Every structure is written in C-alpha cells, then in structure tokens.
C-alpha cells in the first residue's frame, strides 16, 4: 500500500524572516568581500554575490514547503526542487510530489 502525506506551504513569521534576512546580509557581505580577493574573476563574482544578497534581503518573502515523514510523521522542511529525499530521523526515502510526499519502498 502506498503511504503518503500532504505537503503544506507556508511563509516565515516576521521575526524569523528578519533573522533570515540579516543572516543573508551579514554572511553575504563577508562572502562578497572574501571572493573579491580572488585574482581576475573576484570582483565579478563579488558583484554577482552582492546582487543575490540584495535580492534575498529586499526581495519577496519565500514560500516554504513543509511536510511530515510518511513513516515516522516527523515534520521536515522540503526543497521542492528535489525529487527524492531521505528522512534524517528514520532514514526512509520519499518521493517529493507537487502536493504530497510518498514513501518509497526500497525492499
Ligand atoms: Zn521519518
């Protein structure tokens, strides 16, 4: 029998959103300064990084996807770009669909 659970879409609360953006700002600027020291391509990479950081800091709020492991029901953060993920708690493999997580039976 196929075991699956529904995926939920949500946005971060404003406080976590603020923390997330300040992380991007701080680590992004540190990263941009570090790559600027790379000979020849450094300034270019640094410029690209600054654009990404500004986008992350001042852009739209991300929509996050969360679902429960079909095997152990642990809540997991899902990257919708991945096809198959493994549960860090029980090690079960599951397929990431548009709206659901489906347990993959490896046996
Ligand atoms: Zn699990």
Image (cartoon, rainbow, N blue to C red):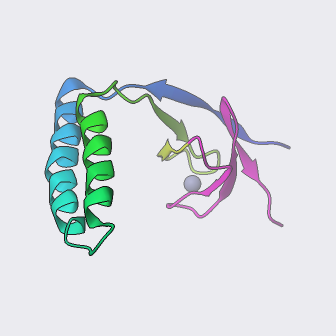
Is 97 displayed left or right of 33 in the figure? right
102 or 15, nearer to the observer:
15
> With 67 as the anchor, is 37 left or right in this view?
left
Q: For residue 61: magenta?
A: no
| Residue shown at 49% from the left, 47% from the top | 74
- Counting from the top left corner in percent of width and height, residue 84 is at 67, 53
Residue at the extreme front of the image, as rendered: 40
**Front-most of 41 and 62?**
41
* Residue in view at x 80 percent, y 58 percent: 105
Q: Residue at x 13, y 51 (%)?
A: 26
What is the total number of numbered labels drawn onto the structure image?
Answer: 0
Left or right of 19, for residue 12: right
- Tell me where residue 47 appears, x and y as whole percent: 27, 51
Q: Position of residue 79 (x, y in %)?
A: 53, 45
Ligand 1 position by quadrant: bottom right
Residue at 23% across, 41% down: 20
For the N terminus, the image quarter is: top right
| Residue range of the region highlighted in magenta in the rendering | 80-107
The answer to whether residue 14 is left or right of residue 9 is: left
Location of the C terminus (image quadrant): bottom right
Q: Quadrant of residue 100?
A: top right
Q: Position of residue 73 (x, y in %)?
A: 55, 44
Asked if the stretch drawn in magenta spans residue 103, the answer is yes
């Amino acid at each position: 029998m196929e075991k699956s659970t529904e995926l939920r879409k949500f946005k971060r609360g404003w406080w976590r959103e603020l923390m997330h953006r300040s992380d991007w700002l701080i680590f992004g600027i540190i990263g941009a300064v570090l790559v600027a020291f790379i000979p020849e391509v450094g300034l270019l990479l640094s410029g690209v990084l600054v654009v990404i950081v500004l986008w992350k800091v001042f852009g739209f709020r991300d929509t996050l996807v969360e679902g429960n492991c079909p095997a152990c029901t642990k809540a997991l953060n899902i990257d919708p770009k991945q096809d198959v993920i493994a549960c860090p708690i029980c090690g079960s493999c599951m397929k990431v669909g548009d709206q659901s997580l489906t347990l993959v039976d490896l046996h």
